[in-house]
Amino acid sequence: MAKGRSDQPIQLSKYRRPLNLNIGMVIFAAVFVYILICVIMSFRTEKITPYEVQEGSLAVNYTYRGIAIRQEKVVNAQHAGYVNYYAREGERVALGDLVYTVDETGRLNEYLQNESMDETTLSDSDLAQLRSEIVGFMHDFDPTAFSSTYSFKYAVKGSVLKLANTNIIASIGDVYGENGLLDMVNFCTSEDTGIVTYWLDGYEDLTPEAVTEEMFEDKDYEKTQLVGRELITQGDPVYKLSTDENWSIVVPIEEEMGRELEAEEYIDVRFLKNQYQSWAQAKLIHGADGDPYLQLSFNNSMITFASDRFVDIELLLHEEVGLKIPNSAIADVEFFLVPEQFLTKSGEDGGEDGVIRESYKEDGTVYSEFVQTQIYNYDQEAKEYYLDTSVLRIGDNLLMPGTQERYTVSRKGSLTGVYNMNKGYADFRQIKILYRNEEYSIVKSNTQYGLNVYDYIVLDAQTVSDAQLLY
């Protein structure tokens, strides 16, 4: 009997070819993965930019506003009445010279205003004085301190009145005699020799050591002009005498720069008001607020600035020249401080610098080993070296060569420097800054453990760490 066909369906499966790997595919895959990793890391890693060190200089701005301090004597009126000035502002008077008069009844003042006096003509020196006041106001004018305009107004008004009154002196006897005013006018002469000024500001008794930072802000400063033909009472301030040609200007300054200028003793100073130059003796002082100030003492030119309390000056110092580097490359790094007697060499005939460190084996046996370390600086006063923190640890015991004396590593000190790139890794180098502005610093060249011209440094010190491989 014949067997029938089966009704079950036939299952067919797809033939899979075996994966044949060869060395070329493996290398290609490895290279692809490496490139992919490098691309990803390049996006995630901050770019390290080199900077070539060059010699250069900076345009140094040594302009300051200082407070003028003089020996000033305020003279008070001995009579009440209307005051008229005859000595000019900033004029030197001797003992007994006529400075002002006081009209007790006011009749002389009325007569001078009503009567037709001879036309007043200003001399060249008078015009020069007014011109100097106007130029000085234009140079110092600050729109944020508009109140100074009123002080200028009263100053010019007082100067014009005092200049006009000088012409009255020639005919004062005739005026008094013809009108019977002689007995009602008090002639007031100078009590001492000095420079006459007609203004007050409350700083007449100021000393250099009493200066504070608030005085330079000029917000609450008030200058009172003493104007002629005004009614005064007995005891009111009537004028001021500067009795000594020796005077000084006090300016705020940084402590370090102040010490450097004091060491130079004498400094050439330019006054911005008239471009006059004079030598001043420099002295670093501390004011009432404890801040550092530079006192510049002069023995001339006081009469030129007798009417000024605030004086703008420029210090004419030597130009700083050295290695010019950007401030972004500068960093402060800490190092271990180790006494010099614990430093040694790796060989008898000299070799690498390092220290002898006390170490322990696994079984507790004590032994000593030479540890090579880089020297970053040497403090001659403390006789200590600044050593790398990457090879030493806090608590390491160092042995003095030839003795059993120990020193435990614990203290650290900070150095200011940059990261050198010449060797392919971030190599810290200490720098000595001579001068700096907002963008660049001038540092001393050819210093031990420092920089040299044409060295390559890291432009941004925040992007690297000490001993980091760069390329």
Image (tube, rainbow, N blue to C red):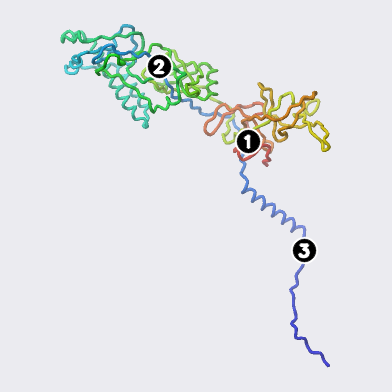
Real-space CA distance between mark 2 and mark 3, rounded to the nearest whole angstrom: 101 Å
Verify CB contact (< 8 Å) between mark 1 and mark 3.
Answer: no
Query: Label 2 belongs to which residue?
Result: 205
Element under disc 1: strand
Q: CA distance from mark 1 to mark 3?
A: 52 Å
The quadrant the C terminus occupies is top right
Q: Is residue 213 visible?
A: yes
Residue 47: image x %, image y %?
Answer: 61, 43
Q: Secondary structure at mark 2?
A: loop
Please state which amino acid type lies under the numbered disc 3: Asn
Which quadrant of the figure contains the N terminus? bottom right
Give the quadrant of residue 105: top left
Foreground mark, 1 or 2, reads 2
Chain-order first, disc 2 or disc 3: 3
Rendered location of residue 396, percent (x, y) = 74, 32
Residue type highlighted by circle 2: Asp
How many marks on residues? 3
Q: Is residue 160 above or below residue 180?
A: below
Q: Which residue is mark 3?
A: 20
Task: Name the residue beneath numbered marker 1.
Answer: 457
